[in-house]
Image: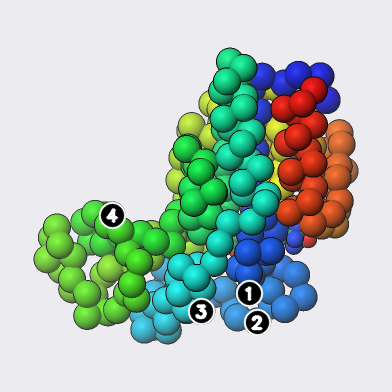
C-alpha cells in the first residue's frame, strides 16, 4: 500500500451497517437467506405483485429510520474530512440503500444501488423523498399516475447508478478499499479487479475473506466497528 495515499476510493457493503442492526444479505440468517430476491427485488416482481414488494421495502425502511450510524460510518466521515484537509480526497461508493453514511456526517456518497428513503415514479422517473410507507394507491406528484411509485433502489436486472463517475474516480485513486461486502454482486464486485489491473493498491476490511479475497494486497478481518476506525486512525495519523 502507498504510504500516504492522497486519493482513496472506498466501496462499502451491507457489512458496514450490520452492527447498526440492518441485515446483511448472504450471511446465515441474512435477507436473501430468508426471502427470495426474485419475488421481491426485480422489476417483474413489482409488476406482478406490487403490494408484496412494497411491504418488504416498507419494513426495511422502518428499520432504517430507527437505526443509527456506528463507529465505522463515523470513521469514514472523519477520513473524508481529514483527507480533504491535507489536499487529498475520498470517493465513497456504497452498495447500501441506507443513509447511515450521510447521517454520520459524510458529505458525498455515491449510492450505486439507490436509496431506500427515496421513491421513483416508474412512468416519468421523478424522484422524491420517501420516509413513510409506500403504497400502490400513491400517485406521482409530477405526472399524476397512480400505482407506479416504487422504491428508488436498483433491482436485479437493472443497471446500477453512477457507473461512469465510479470508473472515473476509481482510475484516479491510489488506494482501493472494500469494506463489508461479500464480493458476490457485479459490477461492484469487479471494481477490485479493475483497480488491480490499473496498478492501484487494494485493501479489504471484512468479517471474513470475501469471494474476491485473493485479489487484495492487504486484508483486515474483523468487525467493521473496530477495524474501520483502526484503519482510519492509521491513515490520518501516518
Ligand atoms: P452481503 O450480505 O453479500 O455481504 C456482507 C459481507 O459483510 C459479508 O462478507 C460478511 O462477512 C460481512 N460482514 C457481516 N457483518 C460484518 C461486520 N460486523 N463487520 C464487517 N463485515 C461484516 O452484502 P453486500 O456485499 O453488500 O443488492 O451485497 C451486495 C448486494 O447484494 C447488495 O447491495 C444487494 C444484494 O443483493 C441489491 O439489492 C441490488
- Residue 46: % across, % down: 39, 74
Q: Quarter of the image for the N terminus: give it.
A: top right
Gap in angstroms between the C-alphas marked 1 and 3? 13 Å
Residue marked by disc 3? 39
Front label number (3 vs 4): 4
Q: Judge left or right: residue 130 versus residue 16.
A: left
Counting other residues with Cα less than 10 Å from the Cα at mark 3, is it few (<14), some (14-19), or many (20 or more)?
A: some
Q: Which mark is residue 178?
A: none
Q: Is mark 1 within 8 Å of ligand 1?
A: yes
Q: How is the image coloured?
A: rainbow
Counting other residues with Cα less than 10 Å from the Cα at mark 4, is it few (<14), some (14-19), or many (20 or more)?
A: some
Q: Are marks 4 and 1 in contact (CB under 8 Å)?
A: no
Counting other residues with Cα less than 10 Å from the Cα at mark 1, is it few (<14), some (14-19), or many (20 or more)?
A: some
Residue positioned most to the top:
87
* Rendered image quadrant of residue 198: top right
Mark 1 or 3, nearer chain start: 1
Q: Is residue 60 visible?
A: no
Gap in angstroms between the C-alphas marked 3 and 2? 12 Å
Gap in angstroms between the C-alphas marked 4 and 1? 26 Å
- Look at the numbered disc 1 and give the secondary structure of its residue: helix
Identify the residue at image location x=67%, y=51%: 71
- Look at the numbered disc 3 and give the secondary structure of its residue: helix
Q: Which mark is residue 34?
A: 2
Gap in angstroms between the C-alphas marked 2 and 4? 29 Å
Q: Is residue 147 visible?
A: yes
Mark 3 or 4, nearer chain start: 3
Residue marked by disc 4? 127
Q: Are marks 2 and 1 in contact (CB under 8 Å)?
A: yes
Residue marked by disc 1? 31
Amino acid at each position: 500500500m502507498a504510504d500516504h495515499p492522497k486519493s482513496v476510493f472506498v466501496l462499502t457493503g451491507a457489512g458496514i451497517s450490520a452492527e447498526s442492526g440492518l441485515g446483511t444479505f448472504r450471511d446465515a440468517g441474512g435477507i436473501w437467506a430468508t426471502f427470495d430476491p426474485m419475488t421481491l427485488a426485480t422489476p417483474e416482481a413489482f409488476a406482478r405483485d406490487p403490494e408484496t414488494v412494497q411491504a418488504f421495502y416498507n419494513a426495511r425502511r422502518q428499520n432504517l429510520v430507527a437505526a443509527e450510524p456506528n463507529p465505522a460510518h463515523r470513521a469514514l466521515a472523519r477520513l473524508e474530512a481529514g483527507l480533504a484537509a491535507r489536499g487529498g480526497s475520498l470517493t465513497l461508493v456504497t452498495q447500501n440503500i441506507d443513509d447511515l453514511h450521510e447521517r454520520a456526517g459524510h458529505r458525498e456518497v455515491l449510492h450505486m444501488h439507490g436509496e431506500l428513503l427515496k421513491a421513483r415514479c416508474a412512468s416519468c422517473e421523478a424522484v422524491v423523498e420517501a420516509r413513510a410507507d409506500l403504497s400502490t394507491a400513491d400517485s406521482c406528484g409530477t405526472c399524476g399516475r397512480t400505482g407506479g411509485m416504487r422504491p428508488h433502489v436498483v433491482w436485479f436486472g437493472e443497471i446500477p447508478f453512477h457507473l461512469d463517475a465510479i470508473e472515473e474516480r476509481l482510475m484516479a485513486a491510489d488506494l482501493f478499499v472494500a469494506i463489508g461486502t461479500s464480493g458476490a454482486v457485479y459490477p461492484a464486485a469487479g471494481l477490485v479487479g479493475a483497480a488491480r489491473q490499473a496498478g492501484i493498491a487494494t485493501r479489504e476490511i471484512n468479517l471474513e475473506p470475501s469471494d474476491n479475497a485473493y485479489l487484495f494486497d492487504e486484508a483486515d478481518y474483523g468487525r467493521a466497528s473496530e477495524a474501520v476506525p483502526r484503519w482510519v486512525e492509521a491513515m490520518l495519523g501516518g
